[in-house]
Image (cartoon, rainbow, N blue to C red):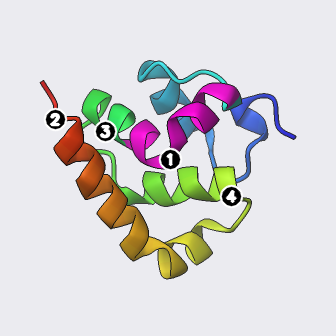
Amino acid sequence: MASSLAELPGLGPKSQQMLAQAGIHTVAQLRELGAVAAYVRTRRAHPGVSLNLLWGLEAALSGLSWQQVAREHRTSLLLALEDYERRHPAG
């Protein structure tokens, strides 16, 4: 099991840097937050972040490729994102 974000597949140096700037430094923190909450936190710190980061985070946590996540889990992730943002408005 990966112990550092650098060991997770699909998360390159830029993603790792953005996660760190959003206060996510460890795999344990990422797992505790989950892909959707980690994505929202990162996007709030970096407004230009694309949905590719969400696919990458879910891929890193699930062990699937980001392409498979984007293809097979896109709708459920987008619904979860919408729900999360409704329950946790920026502010």
Which residue type does callout 3 highlight? Arg
Dot 4 corresponds to which residue? 62
* Alpha carbon separation for disc pair 4 and 1: 10 Å
Which residue type does callout 2 highlight? Pro
* Alpha carbon separation for disc pair 2 and 1: 17 Å
Which residue type does callout 1 highlight? Ala
Mark positioned earlier in the residue sequence (4 or 3):
3
Q: Which residues are magenta?
A: 28-39
Q: Residue furthest left?
A: 91
Classify mark 2: residues with Cα within 10 Å, few (<14), some (14-19) or many (20+): few
Mark positioned earlier in the residue sequence (3 or 1):
1
Residue drawn at (33%, 64%) of the image: 78
Dot 1 corresponds to which residue? 35
Q: Find residue 45 and name its label.
A: none
Left/right placement of residue 68 relative to residue 64 reads: left
Q: Secondary structure at mark 4?
A: helix
Determine whether label 4 and label 1 are within 8 Å by CB: no
Residue drawn at (53%, 80%) of the image: 72
Magenta span: chief secondary structure: helix
Q: Residue furthest front?
A: 87
Q: Is residue 20 magenta?
A: no
Q: Is residue 18 above or below residue 20?
A: below
Dot 3 corresponds to which residue? 43
